[in-house]
Structure formats: structure tokens, C-alpha cells
Image: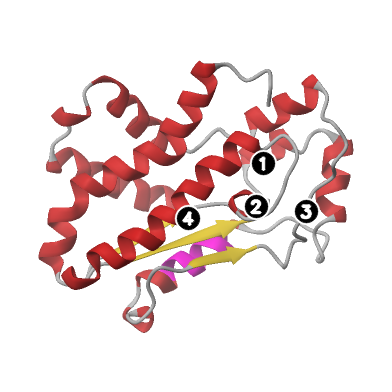
């Protein structure tokens, strides 16, 4: 953590938290007009448990968790539900890069009761449920998709190389990076039409 630059910290908080915050600001009129809006944030197990190399990532996801709960209260009167999913390590190209470090992969499996990575469908199915009428009385919840990962991590000091693993693990999908880029330059110029195209892009990526 001590070697992270202010630019890196700002980038991670902007990507993981600020992009979601500003996207909600833009989407609010559409969500309210629908009469039954549903927001599902992507959080992380790192927002709940102690993980080495993940101090900044965990802080950004902890902020998402609190935003989920607060917006759920704030927007309930408008018929908008706000929830989040908090995955453990899921089998994606990003995670495969991070877990190419064999020592770190062993540590991850040692903390995972099922001793395997999650499948993307095991996360997307939870997201789909939270968007369906079947979950119409569920709001303000952070659903962990984590096979009951333990509460605390290894206290051994991390090396600089291991800290870079933590930095690499903070890379988010293109949609969230695009949102961060927009917020960093001229987010006020992002129209509702542009928002609609981003949402369609996100849906296609999820499929």
C-alpha cells in the first residue's frame, strides 16, 4: 500500500466508485420514470474481508457497499431498488492474469472452501435475479458470491511484486473505465442517449 501513487489511488477510486456514483446520477430520471427501477452494483468480497495487497481495492468496494445501502433508503420512495453482488475470484481473463502467480493461486484456493474459481454465470444469475420481479421486495443488500470465504487474510508483509498483483487486480471492465474517463474529462456532457448506449453495451457484455 505504501508504494501506491496518488494517481493510482485516484484512478482506482474513480474507476470503482466514482463511475458508479455518476452513472446513478445520470440514470436516476430513467429509473424513476420506470416505476420499478433496479440498480445492481458490482462490489467484491474485498469490501468485507481482509486481503493482503487489496487495501485500495477493498476501500473502493467498501464505498460501493455503503452507497448501495444509502441509495436503497434514499430511492425507495421512487420505487427504485439498489443491491450489489460481491464476488470472490471468478474465472475471467482478468483473474487468470492475476492468478498466473502460482503462489498467490495456492493462497486463493486455500481460502476457498470449494477449492475452485467461480464461473461468470454463477454471478450473472444472481444479478439477473436481483433485476427480476421475483426480488421486488429486496433492496439494500450486498449478496456475496463467495462460497463462504474466511474473514481475514495472511498478515505476512507483501513484497513489491505482490503489491503489483493487487494493483493489477483492480482493473475493471471497459464500461467502467469508459465511465471513469468520462468523469475525469467532461462527465456533464454525457447525455441520456449516451447513457442508454452504455447500458446496452453493458448488457451485451454480461451475456
Judging depth in this view, the residue of 60 and 198 nearest the camera is: 60
Residue at 35% from the left image edge and 75% from the top image edge: 132
Disc on the earlier residue, 2 or 3? 2
Which residue in the structure is indicated by mark 2?
A: 90
Which residue in the structure is indicated by mark 3?
A: 152
Circle 4 SS class: helix
Rendering coords of residue 55 (x, y %): 64, 37
Quote the CA–CA distance across marks 2 and 1: 7 Å
Circle 1 SS class: helix
Q: Residues within 10 Å of mark 2 (few under 14, many from 20)?
A: some
The magenta span reads 121-128
Rendering coords of residue 93 (x, y %): 63, 39
Judging depth in this view, the residue of 132 and 143 nearest the camera is: 143
Answer whether residue 205 is visible to the viewer in this image: yes
Disc on the earlier residue, 2 or 1? 2
The stretch drawn in magenta includes residue 124: yes
Answer whether residue 207 is visible to the viewer in this image: no
Disc on the earlier residue, 4 or 1? 4
Residue at 62% from the left image edge and 20% from the top image edge: 4
Quarter-of-image position of residue 97? top right
Rendering coords of residue 121 (x, y %): 56, 62
Which residue in the structure is indicated by mark 4?
A: 65
The vertical placement of 171 against 205, above or below, is above
The vertical placement of 199 against 156, above or below, is below
Which residue in the structure is indicated by mark 1?
A: 95
Marks 3 and 1 in Cβ contact (< 8 Å): no
Amino acid at each position: 500500500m505504501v508504494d501506491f501513487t496518488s494517481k493510482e489511488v485516484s484512478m482506482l477510486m474513480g474507476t470503482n466508485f466514482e463511475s458508479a456514483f455518476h452513472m446513478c446520477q445520470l440514470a436516476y430520471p430513467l429509473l424513476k420514470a420506470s416505476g420499478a427501477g433496479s440498480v445492481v452494483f458490482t462490489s467484491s468480497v474485498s469490501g468485507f474481508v481482509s486481503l493482503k495487497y487489496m487495501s485500495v481495492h477493498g476501500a473502493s468496494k467498501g464505498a460501493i457497499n455503503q452507497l448501495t445501502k444509502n441509495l436503497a433508503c434514499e430511492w425507495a420512495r421512487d420505487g427504485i431498488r439498489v443491491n450489489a453482488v460481491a464476488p470472490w475470484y471468478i474465472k475471467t481473463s482478468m483473474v487468470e492474469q492475476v492468478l498466473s502467480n502460482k503462489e498467490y493461486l495456492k493462497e486463493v484456493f486455500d481460502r476457498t472452501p470449494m477449492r475452485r474459481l467461480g464461473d461468470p454465470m454463477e454471478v450473472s444469475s444472481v444479478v439477473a435475479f436481483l433485476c427480476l420481479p421475483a426480488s421486488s421486495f429486496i433492496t439494500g443488500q450486498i449478496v456475496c458470491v463467495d462460497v463462504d470465504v474466511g474473514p481475514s487474510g495472511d498478515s505476512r508483509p507483501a513484497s513489491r511484486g505482490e503489491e503489483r498483483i493487487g494493483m493489477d487486480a483492480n482493473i475493471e471492465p471497459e464500461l467502467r473505465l469508459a465511465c471513469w474517463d468520462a468523469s475525469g474529462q467532461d462527465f456533464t456532457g454525457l447525455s441520456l442517449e449516451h447513457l442508454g448506449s452504455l447500458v446496452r453495451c453493458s448488457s451485451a457484455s454480461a451475456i
